[in-house]
Amino acid sequence: MNDSVSVKRISSPIGELILGVGRGGCRLIEFADRSDARRSLAALPYNLRVSDADRALFRQVESELAAYFAGSSSASGAPAIPLDLRGTAFQVAVWQALLGIPHGETRTYAEIADSVGRPAAVRAVGIAIGRNPVSVLVPCHRVVRTGGGLGGYGGGLWRKEYLLEFEGRPARTQAA
């Protein structure tokens, strides 16, 4: 039971989100309408009883998201809540690199590949970003194509455009 995760749905300006928290921190922020949401949930060991610690962590995650959507989130890019990011060593390195992208700025897939010491792994970086389990707070929306085109976004390009424009960076949808 130490690895179990409690889940909860909440509303946000970009649609309903599914939160997953456990002993180590926030493990999931997923768009409820995303086609892969069921797969993300199926991979988690559910806990049917929500502990007091999980309730407290849900409040922290909801507070962090509320601060983000109110425009008062940290400019550093890293959330103030504990995260429990699980994946391969490469995936976790990519997700950690995303946390270093400041609010209102973007990086290219190639820049992320360079930052994790794998400059030729641009496609692998894109795949790892697509598997980011903690949307919005691990800011995969801040990664764009070389030249500024949006690239992809698991939550839908309209959400990526919304988040980038919300953060003060005009989104460019055309390929570069």
Image: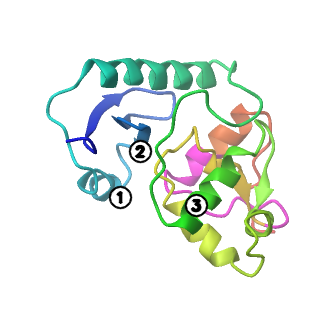
* Front residue of this view, candidates 100 and 38: 100
Residue closest to the eye, 172 or 142: 142
**Residue 155 lies in the magenta-colored region:** yes
- Label 3: element kind: helix
Q: Label 2: state its secondary structure.
A: strand
Q: Residue 125, percent across and down? A: 64, 69
Label whose residue precedes the other's in the sequence (2 or 1): 2
Give the distance between the C-alpha atoms of the residues marked 3 and 2, in whole angstroms: 13 Å
- Tell me where the magenta segment starts and ends, as one range: 146-160
Q: On the picture, is 55 further left or further right than 24?
A: left
| Residue 106 versus residue 82 in the image, above or below | below
Q: Is residue 8 above or below residue 100?
A: above
Question: Which residue is pictured at 79% across the width and 34% down the height?
Answer: 168
Residue 13 lies in the magenta-colored region: no
Circle on res. 36: 1
User: Cβ–Cβ below 8 Å for labels 2 and 1?
Assistant: yes
Mark 2, other Cα within 10 Å: few <14 / some 14–19 / many ≥20: many
At x 48%, y 61%, the residue is: 131
Write down the residue under mark 3: 129
Give the mark nearest the N terminus, 3 or 1: 1
